[in-house]
Amino acid sequence: MTFDFRSLIADVPDFPKKGVVFKDITPLLSDPEGFASAIDRMAEPFVGKGIRVVAGIESRGFLLATPIAYRLGAGVVPIRKKGKLPRRTHSATYDLEYGQDSIEAHCDAFPPGTKVLLVDDVLATGGTARAACELLEQLHGKILGLTFLIELEFLKGRDKLPGRSIHSLISY
Ligand code: AMP
């Protein structure tokens, strides 16, 4: 069955700042059929690939990574904003429009060589996903792919992720 995911994504102009059209996924998350179908479709290309860990990017990535991990029979690892994780972390930095930000994961989040899938809600410029990949590779994870609910193709995020296996459900 093909599901009309787009009808469950709300465009919010000028949020969080002028000029940005924010893709609000909360109508999709709260729709039982839409949510189940989105999780199945995001996980589908990675079924049977031996994924042991699904890494989700704070914070909307957590809402998708967790059910995808359950669907794949994998564990889940949070990639968090700076200063949120309680034990020793690795970090990676990425550029914002003004300045930089960091994301972190626990150093012992998974054993070296673990097959990892990276999940987030939106692929925009690709800076966050690229930093997350750097971080997972610092931990010696083997990244089998990246899966997003939404890809903003006009921002060319894929160009920052050469050679990666990237799957997205809805493109704009
Ligand atoms: P980027 O690093 O530019 O690819 O941005 C990706 C991150 O920012 C993701 O974690 C998204 O949740 C968030 N993001 C970027 N653009 C949007 C947007 N238009 N609507 C909702 N979230 C966005």
Image: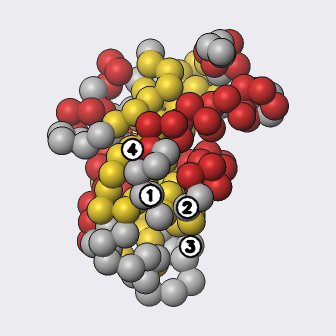
Provide the secondary structure element on which disc 3 rests.
loop
The type of residue carrying mark 2 is Ala
Cβ atoms under marks 2 and 1 closer than 8 Å: yes
Provide the secondary structure element on which disc 4 rests.
strand
Q: Position of residue 135 (x, y in %)?
A: 32, 65
Q: CA distance from mark 3 to mark 4?
A: 23 Å
**Residue mark closest to the camera, 4 vs 1:** 1
Cβ atoms under marks 2 and 3 closer than 8 Å: no
Q: Nearer the viewer, residue 16 or 30?
A: 30
Q: Identify the image quadrant of residue 32.
A: top right
**Residue mark closest to the camera, 3 vs 4:** 4
Q: Which residue is mark 3?
A: 84
Q: CA distance from mark 2 to mark 1?
A: 6 Å
Q: Position of residue 51 (x, y in %)?
A: 44, 58
Q: Which residue is mark 2?
A: 74
Q: CA distance from mark 4 to mark 1?
A: 12 Å
Q: Which quadrant: the N terminus?
A: top right
Residue at point 30%, 72% (across, down): 113
Q: Which residue is mark 4?
A: 146
Is residue 78 among what the camera can see? Answer: no
In the rendered view, tell whether residue 135 sits above or below residue 18: below
The type of residue carrying mark 4 is Leu
Residue at point 67%, 29% (across, down): 37
- Identify the disc placed on residue 51: 1
Provide the secondary structure element on which disc 1 rests.
loop
The type of residue carrying mark 1 is Ile
Residue at point 37%, 62% (across, down): 115
The colour scheme of the drawn protein is: secondary structure
